[in-house]
Amino acid sequence: MKKSLRQKLDEISTRHQEVEALLSDQNIANDMDKYKNLSVEYAKLDLIVKDYRKYIVNESSLKESEEISKNETGDLKKLADEEIKISKEETSLLEKNLEISLLPEDPSDKSNVFVEIRAGTGGLEAAIFAGDLYKMYCRFAERQGWEVELLSENEGDKGGFKLVIIKINGDRAYSKLKFESGAHRVQRVPETESQGRVHTSAATVAVMPEVEQIEEYKISPDDLRIDTFRASGAGGQHVNKTDSAIRVTHLPTGVAVECQDGRSQHKNKAKAMSLLHAKLLDSEKSKQADEQSQMRKKLVGTGDRSDRIRTYNFPQGRITDHRINLTVYNLESFLDGNILTITTPLISEYQADLLANNEI
């Protein structure tokens, strides 16, 4: 283990003891805000310290086994050599986990997300594919125990969506979905294709963290134009009788969002404003894309949503993620929300690249 990493872990262990002592202080216990913040810090430190303690035990065991192997012969040496192999593997894994735990965290990772799915090239088939992606993310959220809110939809002429926007509320939702942004390509035979030819269509996905603190992007009321209109789509007769739908336009940038989810104009406005903040913040982050490292660009693209990140090939039943050159053959299950077979390797690759560029 690098000296700098061990030094950092020793500092964390010391802080862990300090926080533990503070939590037992009655004066701290009476201050709910301070106690809550310390409890959150302790929980995070505790996970790191436990792994560090395991590492130290394994390291000690490895040295003992190496000493035995060096000085003994026969079965005792053979047993020690087996212990050395096991200890080295466990120690290496623990060291990697500890390095990952010390990587700087994306402040948005804990956020809820807005997912915007837009049909691209391919006409009717692109809209149908956008609908497939919508169902896929809803199923994934369901499997994670998350809540999905449908904010806006523009249905396709033959099914699916020309555009659909949802909000997913869940534990660390952004950390698990942030690499979904980009162009998703589908290759399959459309139902309307009489000659059985495979067509290629596309849909774009934009994943944006919810902005919890409005101060992150200040918006002047003078910069907004708010329009009301009658909602369209499913919802019975009532949905078309009241001007409950809201469209908010940010005049300096031209960014416009709308929400027609419920009957309450007030609630629709609140949701639209939340989405607007997320879009404006996402736009600001996109401007900084060129300053990002090549490592991050490989995983999340350059900010240009025309980038092809993934192909869904129906004839072969495969999905290929082009950023990490990974192909899996579980298309049906993947579209049913089992997307971890690709999202987990994406995150691991991202962490590996961070480690390669980290000074610890």
Image (tube, grey):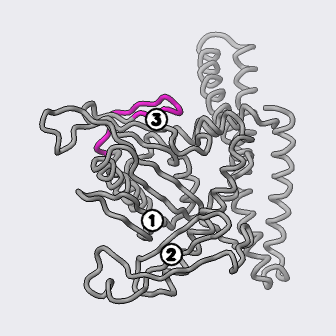
The residues bearing labels 2 and 3 have C-alpha atoms spaced at a distance of: 35 Å
Res 150 → quadrant:
bottom left
Q: Which residue is located at x 58 percent, y 53 percent?
A: 175
Q: Position of residue 169 (x, y in %)?
A: 51, 67
Q: State the residue position of label 2.
A: 247
Earlier sequence position, callout 2 versus callout 1: 1
In this rendering, the label closer to the viewer, 2 or 1: 2
The foreground one among 57 and 164 is 164
Q: Amino acid at mark 2?
A: Arg
- Magenta residues span 320-333
Earlier sequence position, callout 2 versus callout 3: 2
Q: Position of residue 250 (x, y in %)?
A: 62, 70
Q: Position of residue 345 (x, y in %)?
A: 52, 38
Q: Which residue is located at x 40 percent, y 86 percent?
A: 263
The foreground one among 98 and 117 is 117
Position of 175 compared to 214: left or right? left
